[in-house]
Image: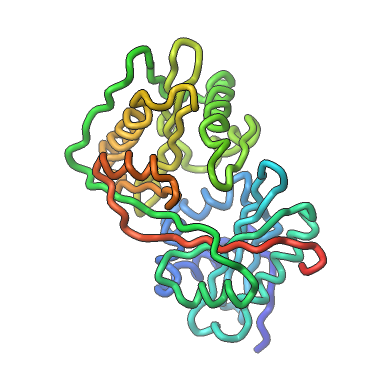
Amino acid sequence: MALDIVPWTLDRLELGRAVIREPELAPQFEQKLGLGDLERWLADPFCHAALRWLAMDGDTPAAVAFGFLLPGIQRPWAMLRIGVREEYRRRGLGHLLLDHQMRALAEAAPECGDVCLAAWEPHPEAEAFAAALGFTFARRFWEMERPANDLPHPAWPPGIVPRVFDGSDVALADYNDVYNASFASHYRFVPSTVDTLRARCETPGFIPGSVMLAYEGDRVAGFCRNFVTSSAGEIATLGVAPAFQGRGLGRALLRWGVRWLGEREATPITLLVDGENESALRLYRSDGFVVERTRTLWSRPFSVACA
């Protein structure tokens, strides 16, 4: 029977979930496997509906694809994800799904700069797939983990006052400002706006108390956002504005996040860090985090002509 490629719409949500729950794919998609996890990811304001596709063998889902269209400093870029069940591999199905994503991307964002693929190592099949389609190695990220015991209290630097995010317009503006200030020089910085941040805070499962903002007077100095899935607790993003770095605020925010997750038994406690961010790595290691696994990112330029 010929396979059909159809849009992965919300009424077909469970078909895609069945694919990524397959034993050979689950380790690559584990944060999206539990009740409510996938819904939360697909509700992300950057998860683009046109990049979501299913491959169907009659009534049986064979493969799934989805992607994120992300703003950049100069041009947007895309992060694409594809999962093919073992019995349907080596038929060119991954190539076909990627082709559908690239054509959709050409319509949705012809100005796109480049596209990326990623996988947890070791994954020789993903590496070969990326190489065959012209993707080259771009970066490695490390998932780090620490035990949920011996959780130190944060020691806030003099003059710094922590305030739990309350969802107000003022807090949204401060949160947005400090995120952009903290990450503007980072690899693949994704600029934020108040509107996109508000949309993220309205996604299913978002907990307002999972975000802490730190202030010196009326100036927002840093933030920490936690993320809870059915499989783990994560320090999702942590940043300190350049004017406030070097004062111990990053460590205080990290310890607040770790305690928040530990007290809610959201374990294991994890975070993902750029493998070339040496200052962040030193901080996390010194507070008990160790590298558990590595995620590889591949990229290639996007061109409407070759989509």
Where residue 285 sits: x, y (%)?
28, 44
Q: Is residue 254 left or right of residue 170?
A: left
Whether residue 80 appears in this view of the structure is no
Where residue 80 sits: x, y (%)?
60, 61
Quarter of the image with the N terminus in it: bottom right
Q: Is residue 27 above or below residue 4?
A: above
Q: Is residue 274 above or below residue 19?
A: above
Q: Using the rendered view, name the quadrant where residue 101 is placed.
A: bottom right
Where residue 244 sits: x, y (%)?
44, 22
Q: Using the rendered view, name the quadrant where residue 33 is placed.
A: bottom left
Q: Residue at image x 53%, y 32%?
A: 179
Q: Is residue 106 left or right of residue 262?
A: right
Q: Residue at image x 53%, y 27%?
A: 178
**Total count of labels:** 0
Q: Using the rendered view, name the quadrant where residue 72 is placed.
A: top right
Where residue 133 sits: x, y (%)?
64, 74
Q: Residue at image x 59%, y 34%?
A: 197
Q: How is the image coloured?
A: rainbow
Quarter of the image with the C terminus in it: bottom right
Q: Residue at image x 67%, y 60%?
A: 51
Closest to the observer, 64 or 115: 115
Whether residue 38 appears in this view of the structure is yes
Closest to the observer, 131 or 174: 131
In the image as oriented, which residue stretches furthest toward the top?
217
In the image as oriented, which residue stretches furthest toward the bottom?
1
